[in-house]
Amino acid sequence: MKIISQAECEEWLADNIAKGLSRRQVEAGYAHYVAYKLPVNTGPKTSLAHALTHFVEIGQHGLFWITDWGIFPSTQNMALFDGYRKSLGEDRAIHAAPGHVFDEADSQQLECLFDLSLYFYWDVSVFDRTGTFLVKTSHDGYISFHARDGARLERFRSSLDRYKLEPFSGVP
């Protein structure tokens, strides 16, 4: 896993998905989406993080970009997050390096990042290198999946059926 700055995240998007577009413009380009309320308890969040990691690995290469944090300081533990990143060899703070480029060898690290972001109610955007899907988590307590085609969206939806997540009716 390679940890990168915000500017490098933007370069990654330009090189891999959409030249000249911002993250928000890229996110708006997905035609299909579904959103679910996040579980409240850590056990179901951990199971969900495992499922998300398995699904994201289908793309095998991508960007895990933490786009907002600290909204609810009482729900996060920066010492835990910083310690985890130090175990990956990263000393920079999250504001200096919010991006994580992953490949198929990084599934355990990717799952840990999903775990921490779900526990801490952080906003995250996870892009695959080909731009076929986007997974987003929100501090507002939902997760959304965006896809360029409906079949990919249905595979995601069916992979989450066993978690019995409630649909989220807000606008992701």
Image: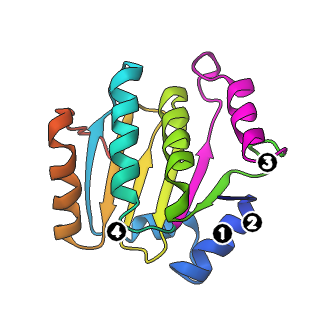
Q: Determine which of the numbered discs, if any, sits on residue 31 in the image.
A: none
Residue 97 visible in the current orientation? yes
Residue drawn at x 80%, y 42% as measured from the top left: 93
Q: Which residue is mark 3?
A: 89
Looking at the rendered structure, the kind of residue marked 4 is: Tyr
Q: Choose the circle earlier in sequence order: 1 or 4.
A: 1
Where does the image place residue 71, in percent across and percent down from the top left?
61, 29
Residue drawn at x 23%, y 73% as measured from the top left: 149
Residue 56's quadrant in the figure? bottom left
Q: Which residue is mark 2?
A: 7
Mark 3, secondary structure of its residue:
loop
Where does the image place residue 3, in percent across and percent down from the top left?
71, 56
Q: Is 83 inside the magenta-drawn segment?
A: yes
Verify CB contact (< 8 Å) between mark 2 and mark 4: no
Q: Which residue is mark 4?
A: 30
Give the class, few, some or many, for how many residues have Cα within 10 Å of label 3's Cα (few <14, many ≥20): few
Mark 3 or 4: the one toward you: 3
Verify CB contact (< 8 Å) between mark 1 and mark 3: no
Q: Determine which of the numbered discs, if any, sits on residue 10 in the image.
A: 1
Segment colored magenta:
62-91
